[in-house]
């Protein structure tokens, strides 16, 4: 492939705006980025343009993102998720074969979708990854995080993408100063003519991924509000655990996303570093949120609070991340 190609905004690495606390004051917390029309310290991001479908390499821009809450052809809970396939059999000692190289066209289409920052395009990109594979689960998780941004009414940006000797480097300006944060994606392997595996920052993302099938997602309820675990991914590079959760409510509810805490397997409880999502939900609506936890690992319990309209009842949701 050719020289470097630039896309316009953020996806593979998404530092997200932080939601405001519902039904109560935030105390002495530091100023945070907000959602739904509230003040934000994030830089203005321009809307990406549609790529040229005839291009042989990655095109310049992503398609415009859908409106918050738009139907992406997902399942009833609104998740662009799929049921993981059966695990690959471990070859007998001495018979391990080198993984097949992924087709170039599939890799290009996969990276284009991953870098777009648009959850709809990411979901479409899943057709270039083998179902049940690490590549499929990784893109599924990134699509879920991107959808949380869309539900929050935040701009969706594309990553600047550079073709390297090992694969691709995706960079995004993820803070008010515009300093870029980059991650490498390479080592693509094939499965059934599609992308099956990849390396992120030189490591296999598989061990840190948790993408339960539709019938396996932990689900909890409180005061007519249902929370469902969608995905989780712990980056091996910076040890950050990112959890995405779907919310469905029968009543008007204000969720305290920023006040969410996480209790690990060892009983240690820590606050989320950042959260993004729509915290004010009308009765009968669905949305999702993404939570960022430094140094945490799957296997704990994500505790989300909130209250119904006028705080007539309090909501307590303990979502198992397993």
Image: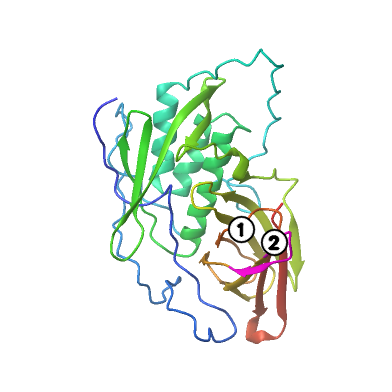
Residue 173, by quadrant, is bottom left
The residue furthest top is 95
Residue 281, by quadrant, is bottom right
**Where is residue 48 shown, x and y percent of the image?**
31, 50
**Where is residue 118 shown, x and y percent of the image?**
43, 49
Marks 1/2: CA distance?
A: 7 Å
Q: Dot 1, crowdedness within 10 Å: few (<14), some or many (≥20)?
A: many
Nearer-N-terminus badge (1/2): 2
Q: Dot 2, crowdedness within 10 Å: few (<14), some or many (≥20)?
A: some
250 relative position to 144: left or right:
right
Q: Magenta segment, which residues?
A: 263-271
* Front residue (pair 198, 36): 198
**Pointer 1 with pointer 2, Cβ within 8 A:** yes
The residue furthest left is 3
Instruction: Name the residue that disc number 2 marks.
Output: 264
Way the structure is coloured:
rainbow
């Amino acid at each position: 492939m050719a020289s470097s190609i630039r896309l316009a905004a953020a996806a593979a690495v998404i530092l997200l705006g932080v939601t405001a606390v519902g039904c109560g004051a935030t105390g002495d917390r530091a100023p945070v980025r907000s959602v739904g029309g509230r003040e934000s310290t994030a830089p203005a991001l321009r809307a990406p343009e549609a790529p040229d479908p005839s291009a042989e390499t990655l095109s310049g821009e992503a398609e415009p993102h859908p409106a918050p809450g738009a139907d992406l052809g997902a399942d009833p809970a609104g998740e662009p998720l799929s049921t993981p396939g059966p695990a690959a059999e471990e070859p007998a000692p001495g018979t391990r074969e080198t993984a097949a190289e992924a087709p170039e066209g599939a890799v290009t289409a996969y990276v284009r979708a991953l870098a777009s920052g648009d959850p709809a395009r990411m979901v479409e990109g899943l057709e270039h990854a083998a179902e049940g594979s690490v590549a499929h689960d990784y893109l599924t998780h990134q699509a879920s995080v991107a959808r949380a941004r869309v539900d929050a009414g935040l701009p969706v940006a594309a990553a600047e993408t550079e073709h390297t000797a090992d694969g691709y480097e995706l960079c995004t300006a993820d803070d008010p100063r515009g300093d870029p944060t980059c991650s490498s994606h390479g080592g693509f392997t094939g499965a059934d003519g599609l992308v099956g595996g990849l390396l992120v920052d030189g490591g296999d993302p598989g061990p840190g991924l948790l993408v339960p099938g539709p019938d396996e997602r932990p689900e909890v309820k409180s005061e007519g509000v249902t929370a469902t675990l969608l995905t989780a991914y712990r980056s091996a590079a910076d040890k950050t655990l990112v959890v995405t959760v779907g919310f469905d409510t029968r009543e008007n509810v204000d969720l305290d996303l920023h006040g969410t805490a996480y209790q690990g397997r060892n009983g240690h409880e820590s606050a989320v570093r950042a959260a993004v999502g729509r915290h004010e939900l009308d009765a009968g609506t669905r949305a999702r949120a993404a939570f960022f936890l430094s140094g945490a690992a799957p296997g704990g319990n994500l505790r989300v609070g909130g209250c119904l309209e006028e705080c007539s009842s309090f909501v307590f949701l303990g979502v198992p991340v397993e």
